[in-house]
Amino acid sequence: MLPCILLLSGCLLYPAAASSAPPNILLIFADDLGYGDLGCYGHPTSHTPNLDRLAARGLRFTDFYSTGAVCSPSRAGLLTGRFQTRSGVYPGVFYPSSVGGLPLGEVTIAEMLQARGYVTAMAGKWHLGLGANGTYLPTRQGFQHFLGVPYSHDQGPCQNLTCFPPNTRCYGTCDLGETLLPVFLDEKIVQQPVNFPGLVPLYEQFSKEFIHKAVSEGKPFFLYYASHHTHYPQFASARYTGHSLRRKYGDALLELDGTVGELVTSVWDMGVQNNTLIIFTSDNGPETMRKERGGSSGLLKCGKSTTYEGGVREPAIMYWEGKIKPGVTNMLASTLDILPTVAALAGATLPNVTLDGYDLSKLLLNGEKSPRNTFYYYPPSIDPTRGIFALRMGKYKAHFYTQGAFHSETTPDPDCHITALLTEHNPPLLFDLDTDPAENYNLLKPVIPKELEPVVNEIQNERQRFLKSMTYAESEINKGKDPSLRPCCNPQCTPKPSCCHC
């Protein structure tokens, strides 16, 4: 739980840390979390007291976007401040045998802050490539310490693992024919297969020890906690299993919320709450194909793998005790903006590359208007000849292409389903997201109203400008697969992958 931090409650305030030091950065990234999944975003049965309290004491965003509708591209955008097109992290996601990864020439938040004197660590899901001899692991991308897995926890035969109570299966199935999911400590496999019920407690211990050591040594820290929750199949440790009204998905969400509480409590216990920026958001929308086990987009349309709002608009909370005024903002913002914002707050030097993010520090600290007025929506299967599927400018969103996805199956809306084939729209579909966030009412049907002609022209011009300015790197994901790259703690054993067990 979050610590009690109001004098009215009878709790004591911890002493404030010196404000002149560069702020610590705690970045918590959920997995497949829907816009409507948290209590503070309106879900009636989600029990998320720590996140709700963080939102009440921080700044909650209503219009916050991830760069991709699936895992790997969105994580590349987050850590580099650049669209995934620039780093080649497209189309789709990395697999255990993928040859490519996030190019080492890309500068991550961790590398930027390490150059500023920060100690850096990551716990959780990486999913930006493994490569030969760990070429693309976090330790090669600016993280001095790493405890976690190199890809999604369903990318391995995990369906026979047991959860709590003993002898019960974890919730769902995973990929067959792959190697058993490993846990890395830095670049060494310390567990294979992963022990799901003990995984999050292990991450929490690692994270709290990192925070304690950094503060004790007087060093600013950057901790990137990339949670597995609430990606399918859901799991939870004994402390949280069976405690949520939302059943299995809710248990996983409850554990994610508990982790937030543990990490924030560690910040307060070390007395650095006045000099620590805490950021919480997620990589992409929910897998509605999983029904009640796949999360909720709330009032938004569709979910994961689509460029409708439910695919990429995410919960986002930023909290800095005594620095960020509590409230709710409908200012436009994105994961792309985290790197330049952190750079401004930390006094770090920005990478000498084209960035797609904006510095939000004046929005956070002074309540000023966001410098972002546009957002560009890429599908998972990026085709440079088509470019973006949609563009948001102010309150208006235009769809140039629409396509459903298997991740967004089972909802009543046929536009979300895989049977909704790729369709080009000329003129585009146009929605007013202020009055119609569910994208129900196309403003240009049956014809373009005269008063909206300037809006459509401005959006079309911006689309052309963006398309001409974008550089597409060679696809890292299309570099192919090599089964010998699948991680194995007993590299000489046979037969693989089943023998990779330690």
Image (spheres, rainbow, N blue to C red):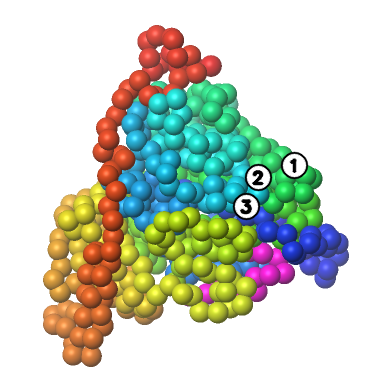
Residues 253 and 473: in front is 473
Query: Mark 3 or mark 1, which has the lower sequence index?
Result: 3
Label 2 near label 1: C-beta < 8 Å?
Answer: yes
Q: Cα distance, mark 1 to mark 2? A: 10 Å
Residue 425 in the image: x percent, y percent? 15, 68
Q: Residue furthest front?
A: 352
Residue hosting label 1: 213
- Report the magenta stretch's main SS: loop
Label 3 near label 2: C-beta < 8 Å?
Answer: no
* Image disc number at residue 116: 3
In the image: residue 214, left or right of residue 415: right
Q: Residue 395 occupies which quadrant of the picture? A: bottom left
Q: Amino acid at mark 2?
A: Val
Q: Foreground mark, 3 or 1?
A: 3
Q: Cα distance, mark 3 to mark 1? A: 18 Å
Stretch of the chain drawn in magenta: 318-330
Q: Is residue 284 visible?
A: no
Q: Cα distance, mark 2 to mark 3? A: 9 Å
